[in-house]
Image (cartoon, rainbow, N blue to C red):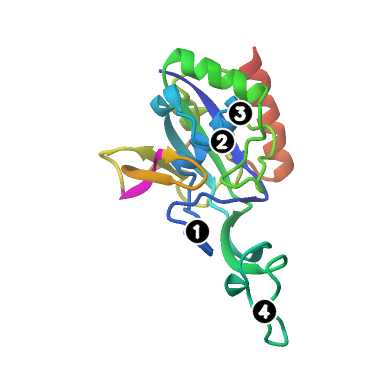
Amino acid sequence: MSGLLLRLAAPMQSWGEHSAFGERDTQNVPTRSGLLGLIAAAHGIERGQPLGELHRLTFTVRVDRPGVRMVDFHTIGGGLPRTRGVLTADGKRQSAATATIVTRRHYLSDAVFVAAVEGPDETVAATEAALRAPRWQPFLGRRSCPPEQPLLLGGVVEDPVARLHREVPIARRAPNGEAELDFVYEGEHEDAFERSELYDVPTEFTRHDRRYRPRPVSVVTTRIPRDLFTASADDYRAELATYLQGAAR
């Protein structure tokens, strides 16, 4: 099956699954809803519009660098009822025009993932074109998290999952022991060491009514060629440039 390779790297990214009110969580890996949101933004699909053929895309994620979890103590609002605001230092309520509320927003800092996106040929080709000239800024889970470049690693390829295993450089040093990485697959996988269920398949995607259904995911630890690992950030950038030059041929 044909597909694309997306490099998901940024100073911060956040892939929420059950965020509500003032607590905005993140999963340890990119979610299906987050990846569909990134691609929908590139296509120019507005919230509430049907995702159409994008629902037929599937995602396999390689965890190059899991990153460090961090929490941002964040205030939002203004124009809220006074009773929903926070107290000032002297114990009073702010006016409705300036009232704010406190939120806690969870992020992954310095994480790097590479996602293989597979689907029908026409949908994959249209998605490649959209990512090369996005209508709106793609983001990694939240609008405040734009991706580093390159986001799109080359063009349409056959069997992108195999390329994750054999060709795409890895943004970390080789371990002392076995050269292995975790892969996150949709559905059941016979070699999985971890299986879970994520509520990240969007059925309603409007601003005020977001609904999701569950999907099974499997995490598989896979041996990787040691020469795909890189010794430093400069080495990684050089290897990535070499890979992209080969992909462009």
Residue type marked 3: Ala
Residue that carries the numbered disc 4 in the rendered image = 93
Tag 4, which secondary structure?
A: loop
49 in magenta:
no
Give the residues in magenta: 193-203
Towards the viewer: 131 or 189: 131
Q: Residue 175 got which mark?
A: none
How many residues crowd around disc 4 within 10 Å: few (fewer than 14), some, or many (20 or more)? Answer: some
Tag 1, which secondary structure?
A: loop
Marks 1/2: CA–CA distance: 18 Å
Marks 4/2: CA–CA distance: 38 Å
Residue that carries the numbered disc 2 in the rendered image = 38
- Pointers 3 and 2 in contact (CB under 8 A)? yes
Marks 1/4: CA–CA distance: 28 Å
Tell me if residue 90 comes above or below residue 34 in the rendering: below
Residue that carries the numbered disc 3 in the rendered image = 42
Task: Give whichever of discs 4 and 2 has the lower sequence position.
Answer: 2
Tag 3, which secondary structure?
A: helix
